[in-house]
Amino acid sequence: MKLTHFRLCPFSRSIRLAFAELGLEPTLVEERPWEARAAFLAVNPAGELPILELPGSLTLCGSYSISEFLAEEAGQAEADERAMQLFPGSLEDRAEVRRLVDWFHGKLQREVTGAMLAEKVYLRHGAGAAQRGPAAPNVELLRALRANLRYHLGYISFLNDQRRWLAGDEVSFADLAAAAHLSVMDYLGEVPWDDYPLAKSWYVRLKSRRSFQPLLADRLPGMPPPVAYTDLDF
Amino acid sequence: MKLTHFRLCPFSRSIRLAFAELGLEPTLVEERPWEARAAFLAVNPAGELPILELPGSLTLCGSYSISEFLAEEAGQAEADERAMQLFPGSLEDRAEVRRLVDWFHGKLQREVTGAMLAEKVYLRHGAGAAQRGPAAPNVELLRALRANLRYHLGYISFLNDQRRWLAGDEVSFADLAAAAHLSVMDYLGEVPWDDYPLAKSWYVRLKSRRSFQPLLADRLPGMPPPVAYTDLDF
């Protein structure tokens, strides 16, 4: 299996976490989203990440399709008792997991992560950036995104006050999706953890898992994360 | 079961089609997205449609969660042979259905339907529209959205050239999602059908289904659809 990803793409990160939690190791190939290469677009006309290529020329595009595929396949295979169930529990429990996946991969992405990545990473690396020199940061936009992020951290704290994990008693793909977004923002030094202790202690629990370690080791050239990014006791 | 929807919301329409194809009739309650009522936001903090309230205070939000819930529930219930399977076929077939649902509810929504609805419907009805009077249409924006729509119609034609339905041999939720978006654009008179005969003949097949008839009967006050909207031989 070949997984095409970008190291700071939150969708890619959520699927890398899911693979690791299921004990699977796909071959990783990196694509830089701002390059929009023709060969990449031929495989995936939506131009979105991640992409999973399976033996036998089957290609799955996007975290929705891949996460549900992995869950169905794990359900059919010999169950490894230690592996995470991506959508655990009853019909109703699974619906709540999916509502929250939609919340983080949909709403949090639209309101924070997508624009933050574009502003702080893609514009610095995109076409012409070398000639143009670094663009001045859009201070107004960043202020709005930071306010939105606080709203989402409040929601994560609220959920953690009611439940053991975001969607209920069991850890699920909702936790992986949320943590994927926060890990990207954390790499960029944008998460005011100290103001949200419940969200912080939930994130520490995820960050301590084995599945998280490869993500924490990734670096973007010329743009190191803050020291606390890899620190489990931050 | 109570389904909160808005009559021209493509996500709501896709779920209404799914209910009808499964032979289920939820009670419909309408919410106008531009009003952002407090009672509505209390049930669904994302403020997105549709919402399904089930007996016993369980609430499902969003088309992702609801479509997968309906599919799982239908799979567990006595199978009605005539009912559509929302995600039919093998693991791989279902992954392709989900890729396309993501394409239409994600990419087509971002690139066309969302902004078209905002421009042509929400801004006309939103807060202060009565005092302000009708805003002038944003001609540049509409031109860009129409070009994007042509790209998507080309993709639907391409898929129909290869397959009987969008995701394969079987009709699926991918067809319902795509048709929901196109039906909204069609209501607004925005679909250049004659330039895309393959997409048109696929749409005629869906539009002829029983499940489609309630959608075709809906009207927005003061904004009637073109005559061809309900015509099966347009």
Image: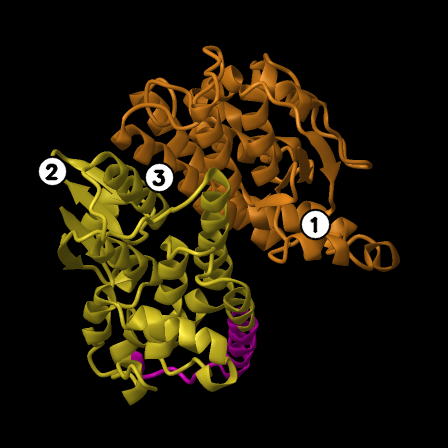
Chain colours: A yellow, B orange
Mark 2–mark 1 distance (CA, rounded to whole Å): 44 Å
Please state if A77 lies on the left or on the right of A47 as rendered. left
Residue drawn 46% across the image and 59% down it: A104
Residue that label 1 marks: B33
Is residue B120 among the parts visible in the rendering?
yes
Subunit under mark 2: A
Identity, as a three-letter code, of the amino acid under mark 3? Arg
Counting other residues with Cα less than 10 Å from the Cα at mark 1, is it few (<14), some (14-19), or many (20 or more)? some
Residue B33: x %, y % from top left: 70, 49
Q: Nearer the viewer, residue B118 or B168?
A: B168
Q: Secondary structure at mark 2?
A: loop
Identity, as a three-letter code, of the amino acid under mark 2? Pro
Which residues are drawn in magenta?
A132-153
Look at the magenta stretch and give its main secondary structure: helix
Please state if A84 lies on the left or on the right of B153 as rendered. left
Residue drawn 24% across the image and 58% down it: A16
Q: Nearer the viewer, residue B10 or A81?
A: A81
Residue A107: x %, y % from top left: 51, 59
Residue B69: x %, y % from top left: 49, 36
Mark 1–mark 3 distance (CA, rounded to whole Å): 27 Å
Identity, as a three-letter code, of the amino acid under mark 1? Pro
Residue that label 2 marks: A55
In which quarter of the view is residue B6 placed?
A: top right
Q: Nearer the viewer, residue A156 or A66?
A: A156
Residue that label 3 marks: B99
Q: Secondary structure at mark 1?
A: helix
Label whose residue precedes the other's in the sequence (1 or 3): 1
Against A180, residue B49 (above or below) is above
For residue A130, the mark is none
Mark 3–mark 2 distance (CA, rounded to whole Å): 18 Å
Q: Same chain for the residues at labels 2 and 1, yes or no?
A: no
